[in-house]
Amino acid sequence: MTKKKSIAICGAGIAGVATAFYLLQQSGDVEVVLIDKNQPLGFTTSKSGENFRDYWPQPIMQRFVGRSIDLMQALRKTHGVTSFEMVFSGYNFISHHKGAPIFGSTDESSSNDNMKVTTDPMTLKKQYPYLDGSIKKVVTIKKAGRLDVHALGSLLLRESKQKGMRFQQGEILAIKQSASGFEIMLDSGNVLKADQVVLAAGPFLNHLADMVGLHFPIINTLQHKFIIPDPKEIIPTDMPFTIYGDAQALDWSAEEAKFFKSEKKYHWLLQRFPAGLHIKPDSGGIKLGWAIQNGDEIPVWETTKLDFFPQVVLKGASKFIPALREYEEHMPSPLIAYSGYYTRTKENLPLIGPTEKQDVFVVGALAGYGTMAGCAAGELCAGHILGQGKLPEYAAYLAPERYTDPEMMKLIESTLGDGQL
């Protein structure tokens, strides 16, 4: 009897879980063990904004994430629509400037099968009465919405366990490679053996990569989100996920500005903040976020809060939803704040596929879009591991070996915008 190939997936976020699922879906000749310091889906995945969209500046990303959305729809068809929530509520990118180049749009003539551009003032006022009256453009992404990533991940875990996957909780202290395979040492003293290893450790990707002599060109930025109640029902419960497409400086009072100037640690509050503030209705009220940090950080398990972040975001959001000013002085409670890492490459394409080390694979750098791309990432990584001959067109663009192809990198870097929110 032929011995099954053993595969250790290091990291149990949505990408690692999906890789395990598609490995076992596509082959009956593998044994899979999923390893994580915490319970599955408990770190970066649990901090997700839980959104999806198929429209991106890069055609490669549009096809990649589009595939993931199709896979999620297929899962709901197979396991039932109650297996995990997936609502096509749309995305709205909005601007105070009619000529804002959101996804290359100009006016209504830019509308296509993927997006709808609205600039007519009367239409905007009628359809979006909660927006500031001087908003000049709304770009609606049609194949987009929200989903329950924990329920999705739980489904993938349950199905994988039924096919024999094991979960091993423990912190990985070392990974040693020999001619006979890999030995993975855990903090419990356990040693796991595997024929192949998948690095799926989210922000800790390079921590594990260093153990096998690899290093990936990634950075980690710590981003924050929070949820507050909406007792005044300012945000319609059916409002699409709404992203402000304009940069802005915040309108602090003279007293506030004076205080921030007097304290060096608060000088950042007086800067011009980037576009991308986002807000959506949530079962607990309103969920808000803003990727205002871009510095590379060494990841830690216990992240820290950012002072004044809720006040910054509410003030920024009131620029395009004026009624939110009612919450600036008297913020509703309880406030639920949480933080997670965006682990990304410079070009914001993920890393999926074989590495230069024999039998070591990677699935990571899914900065801010791991929820929506997780299924396609897992399917693609599984395809690489199983040696499937025909992989999707986007496979070569997402593989680590792209960095050895100057022509491919030139093509990738020529794309306007990276799709980061």
Image: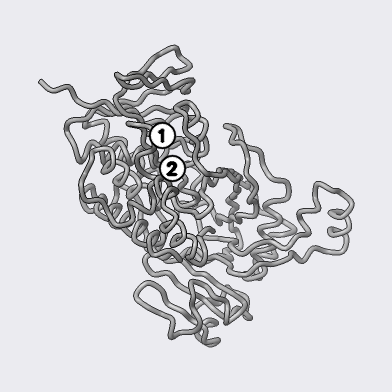
Determine the residue positioned at 63% across, 80% down: 134
Q: Is residue 49 visible?
A: yes
Q: Helix or strand or loop: what does disc 2 sit on?
A: strand
Q: Tell me if label 2 and label 1 are in contact, CB under 8 Å.
A: yes
Q: Helix or strand or loop: what does disc 1 sit on?
A: strand
Q: Quarter-wise, where is residue 62 in the image? A: bottom left
Q: Residues within 10 Å of mark 2 (few under 14, many from 20)?
A: many
Determine the residue positioned at 55% across, 86% down: 121
Q: Given the image, on which type of amino acid does mark 1 rest?
A: Leu
Q: Quarter-wise, where is residue 341 in the image? A: top right
Where does residue 73 sit, x and y in percent of width and height?
28, 55
Q: Is residue 89 visible?
A: no
In the rendered structure, find residue 127 and report the number of the disc placed on it.
none
Nearer-the-camera pick, 404 or 85: 404
Q: Given the image, on which type of amino acid does mark 2 rest?
A: Gly
Q: Is residue 7 left or right of residue 410?
A: left
Determine the residue positioned at 47% across, 45% down: 365
Q: Is residue 1 above or below residue 243?
A: above
Nearer-the-camera pick, 143 or 284: 143
Dot 1 corresponds to which residue? Answer: 199
Nearer-the-camera pick, 212 or 43: 212
Where does residue 136 sit, x and y in percent of width and height?
58, 81
Where does residue 94 sit, x and y in percent of width and height?
55, 72
* Sequence-first tag of 2 and 1: 1
Where does residue 303 sit, x and y in percent of width and height?
62, 37
Nearer-the-camera pick, 35 or 86: 35
Q: Is residue 45 above or below residue 94?
A: above
Q: Residues within 10 Å of mark 1 (few under 14, many from 20)?
A: many
In the rendered structure, find residue 364 and report the number of the disc placed on it.
2
Q: Quarter of the image for the N terminus: give it.
A: top left
